[in-house]
Amino acid sequence: MPRSRPTRTKRSTYVPPAKPKPGPSPRWVPVVGLALIGLGILLILLNYLIPGFPGGNWNLLIGFVLMAAGLLVLSQWR
């Protein structure tokens, strides 16, 4: 009796299916990221340019945190 032809070729190792590519980011991602970086820079500049600016050295910390948050948001931009 003749043998039937296999429908698939057999592989010796398992190859997982390819992962789907993620879609493009929403339009707000780069806008929010750049706005956070801009606000951080603005806050640091105001701290140095205006004597007696309320907040003292906390403005420096908040400014750097805002810039870091902007970089984190921009790292999700596709």
Image: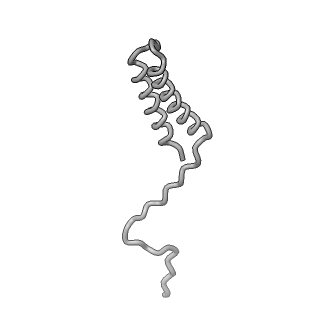
Question: Which residue is at the front of the view, 52 or 32?
Answer: 52
Residue 49 placement (x, y as % from top left): 47, 21
Q: What residue is drawn where x is 49% and y is 77%?
A: 6
The residue lying at 50 percent from left, 73 percent from top is: 8
Q: Residue at x 52, y 27 (%)?
A: 39
Farthest residue to the right: give it: 27
Q: Position of residue 46 (x, y in %)?
A: 49, 21
Q: Residue at x 49, y 87 (%)?
A: 2
- Left or right of 49: which side holds 24? right
Name the colouring of the figure.
one colour
In this rendering, position of residue 13 left or right of residue 9:
left
54 sits left or right of 29 in the view = left
Q: Position of residue 77 (x, y in %)?
A: 53, 44
Is the residue 61 above or below the residue 34 in the image? above
Instruction: State the residue in front, 10 or 6.
Output: 10
* Residue 41 sits above or below residue 74 on the image: above
